[in-house]
Amino acid sequence: MVLLLLLAALLQGESGRHRVPAPEKSRLSWNRAHRALAGGLGGSITHQCFYSPTPANKYERKYWCKLSANGVCYTIISSSGFTSSHYRGRVALGDVPQNGTFTVTMTGLRSSDSGTYRCGIGSTNEGLYVSLNLTVLAGRGVLDPGRFWEQVPQVLLLM
C-alpha cells in the first residue's frame, strides 16, 4: 500500500499535468485506480499496462476486456491468442515480458466502443486488473486536456 502511494506521488511529481486518483480497496488486497481515456470516432487509442515482471507473470495470460451492463467482462483480446470476432482487425495486444508491460491498441473507434475496460493479467478476467473508462467522441478534433485524465502508467503487483 505504501509502495503504491509512493509510486503515485513519484509519478505525479514528474509532471504537474498528471492527476492520480486515490486508490480503491479491493478484495484482492491490492489497489485499483480508475482512469479515463478518450478517442475520436474512427480514430485510435493505445493503452500501456504494467505488471510485475516476475517469472510467473511473464507467462501469465494478459487480457483486455469490456465490462457489460450485467457485470461480466467479456474478453476482447488476450495474449493466449484469442480475439473477439467483433474487434478482429481493430485491436492488437503486444506483450514485452522482460519490461513487465503490454500495450493494447484499438483502431477504427466506434460509438459502441465507449465503456469500461479492464487491462489485466490472469487466467480469468477477475484477476489483477486496472479499470479504464473509454469515451469515443463524435469528432476527430483536439481533445480538451482538462476534461479527461491523462494516462499514467499503472503497476500491477502480485502479493
Image (cartoon, grey):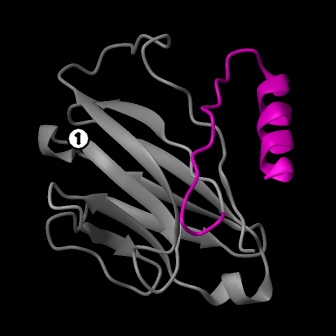
State the SS at label 1: loop
Compared across the picture, whether 132 is left or right of 87 comes to right
- Give the extent of the magenta segment: 1-29
How far across and down, in percent of the image, does residue 103 sit?
54, 59
Residue wearing tag 1: 114
How far across and down, in percent of the image, does residue 33 sit?
56, 44
Q: Nearer the viewer, residue 155 or 25?
A: 25
Q: Quadrant of residue 20?
A: top right
How far across and down, in percent of the image, does residue 97 sit?
70, 76
Q: Residue at x 14, y 37 (%)?
A: 111
Q: Residue at x 63, y 89 (%)?
A: 59
Quick one: quadrant of the C terminus?
A: bottom right
Is residue 122 placed above or below 93 in the rendered structure?
A: below
Compared across the picture, whether 119 is left or right of 75 comes to right
Q: Is residue 44 visible?
A: no
How far across and down, in percent of the image, does residue 116 sit?
31, 48
Residue type at mark 1?
Ser
Q: Residue at x 34, y 32 (%)?
A: 39
Q: Is residue 14 magenta?
A: yes
Q: Is residue 87 visible?
A: yes
Q: Is residue 159 magenta?
A: no
Is residue 113 placed above or below 148 in the rendered structure?
A: below
